Image (cartoon, rainbow, N blue to C red):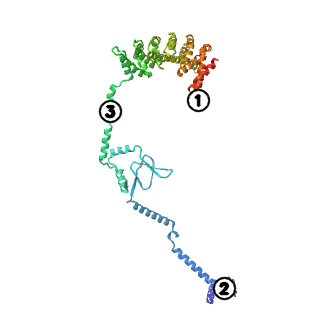
Amino acid sequence: MKVGEEWLSGRLELWGLCLPLGCRAGSRRPLTMPHQGRLLFRMAPLCMLLSMLMVSCFNFCLCHKNSEFALTNPEKREKSSTKETERKETVAEEELEPEILEVFHPTHEWQALHPGQAVAAGSHVRLNLQTGAREVKLQDEDKFQTNLKGLKKGKRLNINTNTYTSQDLKNALAKFKEGAEMENSKEDQERQAKVKRLFRPIEELKKDFEELNVVIETDMQIMVRLINKFNSSSSSLEEKIAALFDLEYYVHQMDNAQDLLSFGGLQVVINGLNSTEPLVKEYAAFVLGAAFSSNPKVQVEAIEGGALQKLLVILATEQPLSTKKKALFALCSLLRHFPYAQQQFLKLGGLQVLRSLVQEKGMEVLAVRVVTLLYDLVTEKMFAEEDAELMRDMSPEKLQQYRQVRLLPSLQEQGWCEITAHLLALPEHDAREKVLQTLGALLATCRDHFHQDTQLHRTLGTLQAEYQALAALELQEGEDEGYFWELLDSINSLLTELR
């Protein structure tokens, strides 16, 4: 140990250095050290030996570490990582090549497509941006398009097999790119034969249409034929009735009704009202009522052709009930929305004819229709005058015609206030409703007569009690403001006006 101290001191002196405890600064001569200082001085070589050993161990560890933790060039490390990834992908592809792929059979609804699944040609594939998954479905009209392509290009890849290998898909793709055409298979030929059996050639269809056009008649031609059959003296009564019955169907249309008068058919039917056969009168009036309805041009021609006089004669004379029903129907169609015809009706004594008809025994059904006609004529005239004052869109000539119709004074003079009040005793609810409406329309004209008619007051009181009970039953059944409640309201309003 002494030799070591001397060697170390000599080395330090050569370096021109002094240990903190062994020499004095600037002196090359050793100093006398205490005991503790000597002890530390003797341990210094041991500490240095241990330090050198630790450094050697650290260098050994660095040299033998894993390459991924070694301090290497980043570019070289990236290149090696890329090569490693490519090597793994190549191995994966080589492993996937012989694998059997599962074929996914799509439907007409979107379905998720899993990795490794193959889809049939012509399928519709999309990427769902919300879920990130691929979805597949059949194209619209996929069956028709597949059949059409099969007919044009020949046999396609059989998509009915359960699985395909990657090589099968590659071969099919190569054939698709090359556009190779193959001969039609037996299945395609059978399909073509089936289509030919189901559908006829267009040439045959054209021939059939040409043959049909020969026998097709226009409405005008049919009406001419029916009028000729009706007007022929050789036609039997049944044939004439059948012709009129068929003609009524066509004249419901406004254009057909105007065509009827254009070739003189309307006047032929009007003349049929003079027939001695009640059935001919009945069906002729039936045709005229359908032709007059909301058709001003035909209404004017009918007035000039004497239809109004002939209808009033049928209603005024003894005729079967069915004949009078049809005649009243034609009269109503002729008078509505035609003020000139209403004037002529009053001049020809039409109110007297209707009054006799209502008072005739067994004509209660016609009485309700007559009351409804009078209500329609009164309200039509009132609304026409009000609309002309408010909107001023009615022609002055038509407004003047309405003002010349003295309907309400004529009704009062002819005794219709009393006749209408007595009709309130009819048992049918529908008939009572029509009579109550007419009484309300005539109230301004017939107020004095209604005040003095004690029978009317008794009838209204009886009906009020009856409909109060019926309205209460409706209310119990959960019907608010039902049919009977409306009738009761009309009765209450009329009684209030008459107090």
Observer-nearest of 50 and 444: 444
Query: Residue at the location (43% across, 46% down)?
Result: 108
Residue named by callout 2: 39
Instruction: Label 3, secondary structure: give it.
Output: helix
Lower sequence index among marks 2 and 1: 2
> Which element type, helix, strand or loop, lies under badge 2?
helix
Q: Which residue lies under the disc numbered 1?
A: 475
Q: What amino acid is found at the position of numbered circle 1 in the picture? A: Leu
Q: Position of residue 314 (x, y in %)?
A: 45, 12
Q: How many marks?
A: 3
From mark 3 to mark 2, how far is it between C-alphas? 129 Å
Please provide percent x and percent y for residue 358: 51, 14
Q: Is residue 461 above or below residue 157?
A: above
User: Gap in Å between the C-alphas at discs 1 and 3?
Assistant: 64 Å
Q: Quadrant of the N terminus?
A: bottom right
Q: Is residue 8 left or right of residue 271?
A: right
Q: Which mark is residue 2?
A: none
Q: Which of pointers 3 and 2 indicates the residue nearer the eye?
A: 3
Q: Earlier in the sequence, mark 3 or mark 2?
A: 2
* Crowd tier of the residue under label 1, counting other residues whose Cα lies within 10 Å: few below 14, some 14–19, many 20 or above: some
Q: Which label belongs to residue 205?
A: 3
Lower position in the chain sequence, tag 1 or tag 3: 3
Which amino acid is tagged 3? Leu
